[in-house]
Image (cartoon, helix red, strand yellow):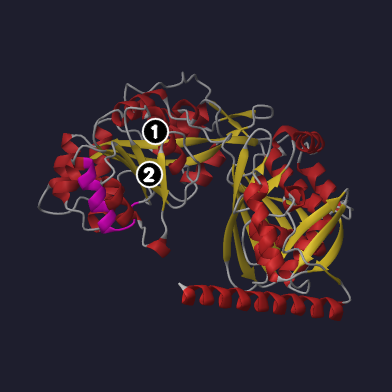
Amino acid sequence: MENDDKEKKLEEILSTVKESAEEREAKRLAENLNLEYIDLTRFAPQTQPLSLISEEESRRALCVPFNSQQREVFLACKNPALEATQQIINNLKNQGYKVQIFIVSLNSLENLWKGYQFITGRKKNITGGLEINKEQLAQLFQEIKNIAILKEKIKSFESPYISQIFEIILAGALKMDASDIHIEPEEMAVRLRYRLDGVLQDISDVPEHYYRSILSRIKLLGGMKINIHTSPQDGRFTIKTDEADIEVRVSIIPSAYGETIVMRLLDPRKIKLDLKDLGFREDDLAVIEEQIARPNGLILNTGPTGSGKTTTLYAFLQKIYNPEIKIITIEDPIEYHLEGITQTQVNLTRDYTFASGLRSILRQDPDVILIGEIRDNETAEIAMNAALTGHIVFSTLHTNDACGAIPRLLDMKVQSAILAPALNLIIAQRLLRKLCVHCKEEVEATPEQSEKIKSMMAKMPERVKKPNLGNKITFYKSKGCNECNGTGYKGRVAVAELLVVDRDIQDLISRDDKIPNANEIKDLALKKGMTTMEDDAVLKILTGITSLSEAENVIGKIF
């Protein structure tokens, strides 16, 4: 017991000596920098100044705001020369604060950091948060009516609070329903572009000194390293508005003239989870609802990146959800959070791949499983076996059309004897821009186009609701107006083809002589009443939903 007391006392003495040494070091640094030293080891942290920066930002920069008075902030710093600390100081100044710097020891910082446990809300989020209040957002929405006004607003921006231009860029993107924001440094300018309805639109040039501040701000918000400029970085943060929390996924890569920034905006208000809103025809919708209601089997959605596959599968989950079934997903990454559904995300650093994750999910007693993508034989075979053992499985695959999915899976060495009975439905889809209802204008089809349309209509099965074709066939084209920012389009709609895997298709897959190719499968499917994406596109052209030029740009030549 006596020895224990001696050891404890010795530890206390050594700790005191260490603390004293750290305080002396902090004092010397303060003298060298001609700044004031302060001991905050016994200071009671105040939550209000702490809320000015996140705990993650504070720990990275080794600085903590410990007091604030009106627009003045008292900042405790281990070393204000650090780049991360300088960025914190600049950001506070850009927000209109006068910053008073004090030199402290690491012991003081550790004491101040304890105060973060009492903070709730945006600044405690590990990925960072940017709050735009209702009044701010409403004002910006009122001012930014179109791209021309936004461009002028950025061009004429002059303010000591540089963070405001970042808010303008974000508000403009939200106002115009942009899915992505691109900030691209070039030789003579920094280019700002939005992706609107799947197409990149030039917005404005951003002054270089604003670009540097925006870049640092994004890195801090996204939990990235601000002093790394030669390696790619990924991060995410949240835009908090009164109506919704909008997740922002950030990708930054080095380029010839600086770092290129791409921000994907994941607005939960914009995701269409009602099947009727996605654009499927009534007859196709009836087929989909019948297939997703089955107790087991695999439903695949195919198409290139950005074709709306994940959104469609989310809508399926929403349609079949009820508290009596368990739904688990494995995604890369999670796009939107769905209430009542267990969502997991691929993590390669922890060996949580689609294949390993799927094996783990099956031990969780699921009824429905969503796999973000089938990429390899292992994932494919586990998915097939799950579909054959009482589970409904949804997944995606990269193929050009529905019929091409089957030879693709067979090429992955999936056994035909397993594939044939596991498959229920294969969907291939693309997204077409919808014509602006305010400015679309009628155009008469040429004689050649009319003949082609009549021929396609005649071959479509009876279940398809066809428009009445008179002597003069007309459709619509885009014109452009203020409502659609001059593009002629507003919003997007799915164009799709559905391959129902019935007994005849199963027999074709299972034959022993050779692997069936996509054309063989398509010929049989057409005989059994399948409509193609081209058919679906023509129907949407004739009803004025989209234009011929848009359809041919996305799915290829039709006429």
Instruction: Say what secondary structure mark 1 lies in.
Output: helix
Identify the image quadrant of residue 459: top left
Where residue 202 appears, x then y in whole percent? 71, 51
Q: Which mark is residue 316?
A: 1
Q: Residues within 10 Å of mark 1 (few under 14, many from 20)?
A: many
Identify the image quadrant of residue 205: bottom right
Front one among 108 and 172: 108
Where residue 535 appears, x then y in whole percent? 41, 34
Residue 200 visible from this viewpoint:
no
> Residue at point 65% right, 47% down?
118
Secondary structure predominantly adopted by residues drawn in magenta: helix
Q: Which residues are magenta?
A: 374-387
Position of the N terminus by quadrant: bottom left
Q: Which residue is mark 2?
A: 329
Front one among 425 and 476: 425
Q: Which mark is residue 287?
A: none
Where residue 322 appears, x then y in whole percent? 37, 27
Tell me the distance, in whole angstroms, between the alpha carbons under discs 1 and 2.
Answer: 13 Å
Instruction: Say what secondary structure mark 2 lies in.
Output: strand
Q: Is 378 covered by the magenta stretch? A: yes
Where residue 464 appears, x then y in whole percent? 37, 23
Q: Residue 21, relative to residue 69: is it above or below? A: below
The amino acid type of the residue labelled 1 equals Phe
Q: How many marks?
A: 2
Q: Residues within 10 Å of mark 2 (few under 14, many from 20)?
A: many
> Residue at point 52% right, 39% down?
432
Residue 541 visible from this viewpoint:
yes
Q: Is residue 362 left or right of residue 202?
A: left
Q: Is residue 375 left or right of residue 241?
A: left
Q: Residue 49, relative to residue 17: is it above or below? A: above
